[in-house]
Amino acid sequence: MKYLLFKVLLVLITAFTASAQKKVALPHGMVYGSKPTLVALMQASKLEAFMGKRTRTSVTVSGKVINVTKPKGGWFILDAGNGRTIAAHFKNYNINLPKELKGREVIISGIASKQFIADDQQQLAGDTVTGKKQHTVKTDPKQRLNFEVVGLMVNK
C-alpha cells in the first residue's frame, strides 16, 4: 500500500514539474552576437533593390524569421517579401539560436551577398579538355541573397 501511494505521489510530482516548464521567452531586445547598429536600418524587402549591381554590401536589415534551420551556428531563413527569402547564418559558429525565434521580427547586421554563378565557366579557366558545359547549377530564383550575420537583436 505504501509502495502504491509512493508511486502515485511520484507520478503527480513529475507531471506538475513537466507542466510547469515553459518555453524559452525571447524578450524584446535580446541580442545574439554583437548588438546591431540601428543607424541605417532598412526592411529586408528593400535589400535586393538597395544592392543594385553590387555583389556584397555591409548593411543592417529588419525582417521576420521564417525558420531556424540549424540552431548551432545560427542558420535561419529571413522573409524578404514577395515570396523571396534570405538565407542567413552567423559569422561566429559558437552562436546557438533558439527554435522559438520562428515568426519573430529581428534586426540583423552583417554582410549581404548575392548568389554568384559562373555561367561562362570561369571556375574552369584553363580546362581545355572539353568545351561542353560540365556543371549544371540549379538556382532558386526565390533565394538569391545570402547574409553573414555579425549581430542579431529580437525586435518584436
Image (cartoon, rainbow, N blue to C red):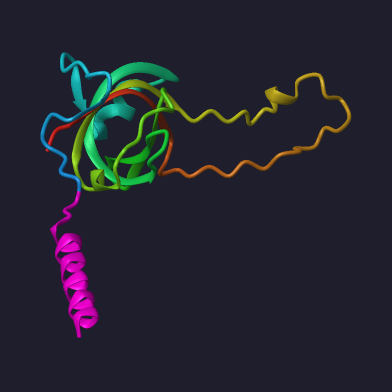
87 sits left or right of 138 in the view = left
30 sits left or right of 138 in the view = left
Q: Is residue 19 above or below residue 58?
A: below
Q: Nearer the viewer, residue 65 or 9?
A: 9
Q: Residue at x 18, y 68 (%)?
A: 15
Q: Is residue 54 visible?
A: no
Q: Residue furthest bottom?
A: 1
Is 130 part of what is drawn in magenta? no
Q: Nearer the viewer, residue 58 or 138?
A: 58
Q: Position of residue 19 (x, y in %)?
A: 16, 63
Q: Residue at x 25, y 35 (%)?
A: 45
Q: Is residue 107 above or below residue 65?
A: above
The magenta-colored residue range is: 1-23
Q: Is residue 96 visible?
A: yes
Q: Nearer the viewer, residue 25 or 147?
A: 25
26 sits left or right of 76 in the view = left
Q: Is residue 67 above or below residue 35?
A: below
Q: Position of residue 67 (x, y in %)?
A: 32, 47
Q: Could you say which quadrant of the image residue 77 lies in? A: top left
61 sits left or right of 110 in the view = left
